[in-house]
Image: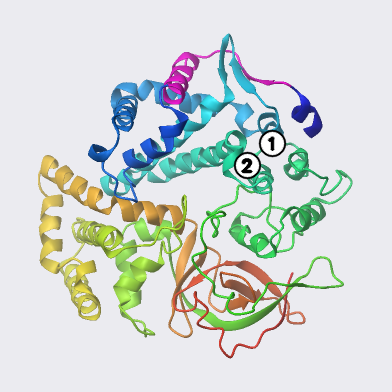
């Protein structure tokens, strides 16, 4: 099929009959795609985004960029809500979820969508998806502060559309990603009846046949064979392994990504960006997969450097009722290896930010955001009707204890917390104003937290280091540095001859730049 699509002149994708949403959806695609030139689109979207990382100002932009920004401001306003709702409905049509449609859109030189009697080029799809994702991020993060009971549902909708955004990038912007990365994304995203087709549907995207379809083979064997020939980087195989609790394929080795899951949380490594960490890549350390007589075993040279001692909150637990307070109490009662407790905490949770490239956390942009988030969450906790004076006094003691141990710039004073609590208990207008102010100041940190910490949890090691890792981690898991890998990994002993189960890559404060390598003795470590 890959050769057929590659050699054809054009492809037509049939989305089905027209619906009530079709005309509005096609209209928004046409406006966003055709009225902003390809040469100015990236800069326009970057400046307009509330996550304008470079600090570029609209006033300093060229007249064309300012016109583009004005156009996007208009189409993203509430007056166009019906169009965006229609576009979202169009994206939920079954065609977008099918595994076999990936090569249908990547390989032909041209393509178009048909929906009833309406037609548009496939390339018109990508920009609106990116803008919809930005719009959904705004609404989802606001719900954290506005107390929406549907926050979880909103995040699920956001995640589903972001998955489509990744598919859109792979399918309709081929030049933005290495060719070998596209099958990975497509294999995870598409829906199919036979699970082997998660892999087989991507084979036409390669310039060679990595494996030959064989529907008699067990699914776990197909996935294992594919990953070893499709991924040129040994370390990137492990980076792509998803949260263990999401895995559904029976008998699949723990080091093989499960292509029946969408891939969650977000991958640790941003391909194409400059590397941020090099926990196992110092000096002449080179990653090397060792030979094994058991094809289910993945053997590397590794060094066990630490162990998980205390397991902390996940993202959902942290942003839930009393979640931040609970985490702060845990931190206050622990022996710490050194450094500022609160600053280390807020920097560690979303530490591995990625996007167009690595984005380092700053006190000005993210530290103040954490402070605003803490102000809102602590004040909300002591404002609840069932909170006793004893609870309030205990919270005050916690805040004062932490402020003695930390840079006070990153934690609100008790007086500020009381003032905000009073605003929350006041009239409705004052309450909403206070919440919107906190939301505006905390939004960038919350975005970072949502993007990188959701699907993970924090922990403290036996040596007193703070880290983040998969949701499924537990006390006793070993921190291992594999020779040549940029990230440490969490392993769990199997109790049968020294082999381990791979839990996932992780972050450990204080060892991410090779600090644990001097004097380290690397030995053969087998993962099964």
Q: Quadrant of residue 348?
A: bottom left
Name the spot of residue 431 as percent of width and height, x first: 15, 46
Q: Residue furthest top?
A: 117
Q: What secondary structure is marked by label 2?
A: helix
Name the spot of residue 473 as percent of width and height, x first: 55, 69
Asked if residue 301 lies left or right of residue 215, the reply is: left
Report the disc number at residue 99: 1
For the question of whether residue 132 can be seen, the reply is: no
Name the spot of residue 353 as percent of width and height, x first: 44, 58
Decide: is 324 above or below 219. below
Quick check: is 178 in the magenta stretch? no
Task: Write down the residue under mark 2.
Answer: 189
**Magenta-colored span:** 9-34
Quick check: is 19 in the magenta stretch? yes
Name the spot of residue 146 as percent of width and height, x first: 26, 45
The C terminus, quarter of image: bottom right
């Amino acid at each position: 099929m890959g050769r057929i699509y590659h050699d054809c002149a054009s492809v037509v994708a049939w989305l089905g009959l027209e619906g009530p949403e079709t005309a509005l959806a096609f209209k928004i695609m046409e406006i966003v795609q055709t009225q902003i030139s390809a040469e100015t689109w990236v800069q326009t979207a970057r400046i307009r985004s509330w996550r304008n990382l470079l600090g570029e100002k609209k006033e300093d932009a060229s007249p064309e960029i300012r016109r583009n920004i004005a156009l996007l401001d208009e189409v993203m306003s509430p007056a166009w809500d019906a169009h965006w709702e229609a576009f979202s409905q169009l994206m939920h049509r079954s065609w977008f979820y099918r595994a076999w449609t990936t090569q249908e859109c990547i390989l032909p030189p041209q393509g178009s969508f048909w929906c009833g009697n309406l037609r548009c080029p496939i390339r018109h799809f990508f920009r609106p998806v990116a803008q919809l994702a930005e719009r959904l991020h705004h609404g989802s993060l606001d719900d954290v502060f506005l107390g929406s009971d549907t926050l979880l549902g909103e995040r699920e909708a956001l995640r589903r559309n972001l998955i489509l955004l990744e598919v859109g990038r792979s399918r309709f912007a081929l030049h933005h990603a290495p060719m070998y990365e596209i099958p990975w994304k497509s294999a995870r995203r598409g829906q199919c009846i036979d699970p082997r087709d998660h892999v087989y549907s991507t084979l036409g995207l390669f310039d060679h046949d990595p494996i030959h379809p064989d529907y008699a083979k067990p699914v776990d064997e197909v996935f294992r064979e594919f990953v070893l020939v499709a991924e040129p980087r040994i370390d990137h195989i492990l980076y792509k392994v998803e949260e263990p609790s999401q895995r559904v394929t029976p008998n699949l080795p723990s080091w093989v990504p499960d292509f029946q899951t969408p891939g969650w949380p977000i991958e640790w490594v941003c391909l194409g960006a400059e590397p941020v960490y090099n926990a196992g890549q110092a000096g002449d350390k080179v990653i090397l997969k060792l030979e094994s007589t058991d094809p289910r075993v993945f053997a590397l040279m590794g060094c066990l450097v630490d162990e998980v001692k205390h397991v902390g909150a996940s993202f959902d637990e942290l942003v839930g009722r009393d979640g931040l307070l609970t985490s702060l109490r845990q931190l206050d009662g622990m022996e710490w290896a050194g450094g500022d407790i609160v600053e280390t905490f807020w920097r560690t949770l979303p530490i591995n930010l990625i996007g167009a490239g690595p984005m380092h956390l700053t006190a000005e942009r993210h530290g103040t955001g954490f402070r605003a988030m803490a102000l809102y969450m602590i004040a909300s906790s002591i404002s609840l009707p069932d909170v006793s004076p004893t609870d309030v006094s205990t919270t005050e003691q916690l805040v004062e204890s932490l402020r003695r141990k930390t840079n006070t710039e990153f934690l609100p004073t008790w007086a500020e917390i009381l003032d905000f609590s009073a605003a929350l208990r006041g009239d409705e207008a004052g309450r909403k104003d206070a919440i919107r102010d906190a939301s505006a100041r905390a939004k960038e940190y919350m975005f970072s937290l949502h993007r990188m910490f959701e699907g993970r949890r924090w922990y403290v090691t036996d040596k007193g280091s703070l880290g983040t890792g998969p949701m499924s981690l537990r006390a006793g898991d070993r921190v291992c540095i594999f020779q040549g890998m940029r990230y440490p990994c969490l392993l769990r002993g199997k109790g049968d001859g020294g082999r381990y189960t791979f839990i996932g890559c992780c972050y450990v404060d204080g060892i991410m730049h090779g600090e644990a390598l001097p004097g380290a003795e690397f030995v053969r470590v087998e993962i099964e």
